[in-house]
């Protein structure tokens, strides 16, 4: 099985949350709270995304983080690469020529490259804006507290 790291997963959650209202500039604590991610993890992710120039950061009392460019111009592939490194399903894809002991004899290498390219292309084809349009309303700022998961129908007066 292969999957994104928790870092990349949380980073995408943070970025989709920021993309929903790009006019805002939020501090790390607000971003962590709105994204439901522990503050230390959110802070680490925000620094990595800023280093990758996907976020801009401003220090000071009115400082915070905001997208460095429009969400339509940021791909999921960029986010994954910024947080997890190069998109590579196998070591031979990541390391290039000479990275594998059986490289010269490997009948699967060319196909792994095709598979890897297809996954990278798919991730490059999905923008942060597309991700933000489908984010559940439970994530992000609200004007009223969320209903309790159990008993919500009773609280709303429903049978």
Image (spheres, rainbow, N blue to C red):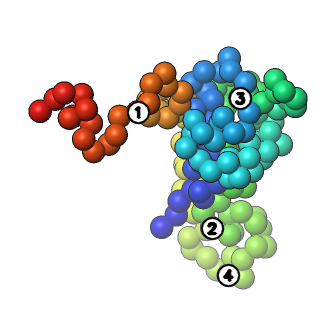
Q: Residues within 10 Å of mark 1 (few under 14, many from 20)?
A: few
Residue 137 left/right relative to 90: left
Q: Which residue is nearer to you in this view: 155 or 83?
A: 155
Estimate the spatial distance between the alpha carbons at disc 1 and disc 4, rounded to whole Å.
55 Å
Q: Which residue is mark 1?
A: 146
Estimate the spatial distance between the alpha carbons at disc 2 and disc 3, rounded to whole Å.
37 Å
> Given this view, does label 1 or label 4 mark the residue nearer the observer?
1
> Given this view, does label 1 or label 3 mark the residue nearer the observer?
1
Estimate the spatial distance between the alpha carbons at disc 1 and disc 3, rounded to whole Å.
21 Å
Q: Which residue is mark 4?
A: 102
Q: Which residue is mark 2?
A: 90
> Given this view, does label 1 or label 2 mark the residue nearer the observer?
1
Estimate the spatial distance between the alpha carbons at disc 4 and disc 3, rounded to whole Å.
49 Å
Q: Which mark is residue 26?
A: 3
Q: Residues within 10 Å of mark 4 (few under 14, many from 20)?
A: few
In the rendered image, residue 121, in percent from the top left (x then y), is placed at: 58, 43
């Amino acid at each position: 099985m292969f999957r994104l790291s928790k870092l990349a997963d949380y980073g995408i959650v943070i970025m989709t949350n920021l993309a929903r209202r790009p006019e805002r500039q939020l501090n790390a604590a607000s971003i962590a709270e709105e994204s439901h991610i522990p503050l230390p993890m959110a802070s680490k992710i925000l620094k990595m995304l800023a280093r990758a120039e996907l976020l801009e950061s401003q220090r000071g009392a009115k400082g915070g983080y905001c997208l460095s460019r429009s969400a339509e111009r940021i791909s999921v592939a960029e986010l994954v690469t910024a947080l997890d490194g190069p998109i590579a399903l196998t070591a031979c894809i990541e390391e290039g020529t000479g990275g594998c002991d059986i490289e010269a004899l490997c009948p699967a290498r060319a196909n792994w490259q095709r598979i890897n390219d297809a996954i990278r292309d798919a991730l490059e084809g999905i923008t942060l804006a597309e991700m933000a349009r489908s984010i559940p309303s439970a994530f992000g700022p609200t004007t009223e507290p969320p209903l309790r998961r159990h008993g919500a129908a009773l609280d709303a007066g429903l049978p």
